[in-house]
Amino acid sequence: MKKNSKSADMPTIVLIYGGKSCEHDISVITACLAKGYFKGNIISVYLDKNNRAHLVGNDWTPKRHLVEKPKSRVVFLTGEGAIGIVKGTRLTKLNVDVAVNCCHGLNGEDGTVAALCQLCGIPLVGSDVASSAIAMDKILTKRMLTCLGFKTVKGVDVSRKSPEQAAQSVAQLSLPLIVKPSLLGSSIGVKVVHEINELDSALKQAFEYSPHVLVEEALTDFVELNCAALRDRGEVRVSNVDVPVTVNELLTFEDKYIENNAEKKPSEISEGLKKEVCRQTADIYEKFGFSGVIRVDYLLDKTTGNLYVNEINTTPGSLAFGLWEGRYSRTGYGEALVNEAIADYRELQCFTYTFESGVLNGAGGIKKK
């Protein structure tokens, strides 16, 4: 553990959140809740909507981010396992034991925070660059899941650069359709299309958020299921299975974060279905090479009985703590995540990252082939 002059006996844990993302505000809420999961010297690093990093107080509420201006900037010191706190012309170096990725969406959940921490040499609670990038892109996720043998709803990739191909691609599908920006979450920009003349409007809206759009056949009688996974002491563990419902056709942004419609739960699902959801969640965690905690969202077609993988979240809302009820205390949950992040980082340090080639010694006289 790196030592700082203050609170040297406690780990220094940096929470990174916010960012230039449509899901910025949800990230703020996740970080404010996550501060209660971790024991140690907590440092809150808030990325504003232009990705400028600021040091803010741990007592900041979500609403306070709207009205108060941070007084210190933060810089990430690559190769030093540290951040720098900048106030005026003075920079104070702060060694970091572990970072926690609380960013949702682009410029955070998509592998950029993982890359930043990798360059800095800071262990991360969260997935690595490659697995995060794949999971952020709904189209890449679908392709990967299909290759690995998981069921997904029939769908096609529609590109903003080739709008003329949209009709041809979508002709393979049956109405109703669901249109989703490929690089977005929280149900933003998602629309159900019942008539083909509604498609252009739905695509236009989705293309405001992403250069590629996923168009899928929309299930009409289905149940959504959520399950989380993490690794604790080297073992992949899966959470309880949640069954959110809504009065709307699909879980909307308002359902999830404003009206709390998604908090309602219908009758219990079968034990067999729960076991299958848990089995697939653990399998996905392993095969994608995820780290930290993830949440996998499923769709159960009540007509056919088919279970489809719908989406994978590498930074789930509130870090998915609610799905682990009865399994972990709040601080026990945070401790498990931190310990595993540090263990993963130490394992990666066993590899060789330098190679003495001697090429540069004669670089001025390299012969052309």
Image: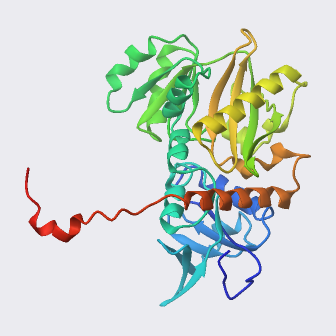
Q: Is residue 26 visible?
A: yes
Q: Is residue 20 visible?
A: no
The picture quadrant where one finds residue 31 is bottom right
Query: How many marks on residues?
Result: 0
Residue 34, given in percent of the width and then of the height, sits at 75, 60
Q: Is residue 95 left or right of residue 325?
A: left
- Residue in the image at 49% along x and 31% along y: 139
Measured along the vertical axis of the image, is residue 298 above or below residue 128? above
The picture quadrant where one finds residue 32 is bottom right
Measured along the vertical axis of the image, is residue 97 above or below residue 280? below
Q: Is residue 290 left or right of residue 306?
A: left
Q: Is residue 71 left or right of residue 283?
A: left
The picture quadrant where one finds residue 347 is bottom right
**69 and 332: which is toward the camera:** 332
**78 and 67: which is toward the camera:** 78
- Residue in the image at 62% along x and 33% along y: 311
Residue 193, given in percent of the width and then of the height, sits at 56, 20
Q: Give the colour scheme shown.
A: rainbow
- The quadrant of the rendering that contains the N terminus is bottom right
Measured along the vertical axis of the image, is residue 180 above or below residue 195? below
Residue 113, given in percent of the width and then of the height, sits at 54, 58
Q: Is residue 363 left or right of residue 225?
A: left
Residue 348, given in percent of the width and then of the height, sits at 56, 57
